[in-house]
Image (tube, grey):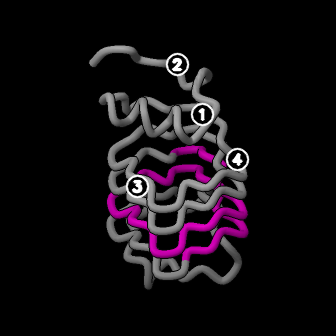
Amino acid sequence: MTDIRSPNDIKTVAALVEAYAKGQRNFSTVSLSATDLSGIDLKGADLSYADLSDADLSKANLRGADLSYARLCDSQLSEADLRGAMLIGTDLRGTDLKNTLLQEADYDPKETHFPTGFDLAAANMRADR
């Protein structure tokens, strides 16, 4: 893997896509709020502590991604694939999770924040505690 960029240097969706295509997976603390990331493939990426609030992540592939303590509040995650993702302490308040695949995703019942009325049992997620 060459040309690894600090997540702090990634300021655009194009830069994120380029870094991922080059094999980079650490995007912890990246800030791309209110951006169009629909359909993006970030399978297995580390997006812990990232700010993706108000972002469009519909139909995104985030399978196995680490989204621990990420801000995803008011985001669009409809039809996204988050199977096996880490959602420990993730802020999902106000997020559209319609038809989102969440099977086997890990969450913390005390620290992960879901949208009002979200059905945890139907999502088939795994409580971390």
Amino acid type of the residue tagged 4 in the rendering? Ser
Left/right of residue 115 with respect to residue 61 in the rendered view: right
Task: First in sequence, mark 1 or 2: give its number.
Answer: 2
How many numbered circles are shown? 4
- For label 2, the residue is 6
Nearer the observer, 126 or 69: 69
- For label 4, the residue is 33
Q: Position of residue 11 (x, y in %)?
A: 64, 31
Instruction: Name which residue lies at 39% across and 47% down.
Output: 42
Q: Secondary structure at mark 4?
A: loop
Given the current orientation, which residue lies at the most extreme top position? Answer: 3
Instruction: Name which residue lies at 46% across and 75% down.
Output: 79
Looking at the image, is 114 positioned above or below residue 128?
below
Task: First in sequence, mark 3 or 4: give its number.
Answer: 4
- For label 3, the residue is 62
Q: Position of residue 22 (x, y in %)?
A: 32, 28
Q: Is residue 26 visible?
A: yes
Amino acid type of the residue tagged 3 in the rendering? Leu
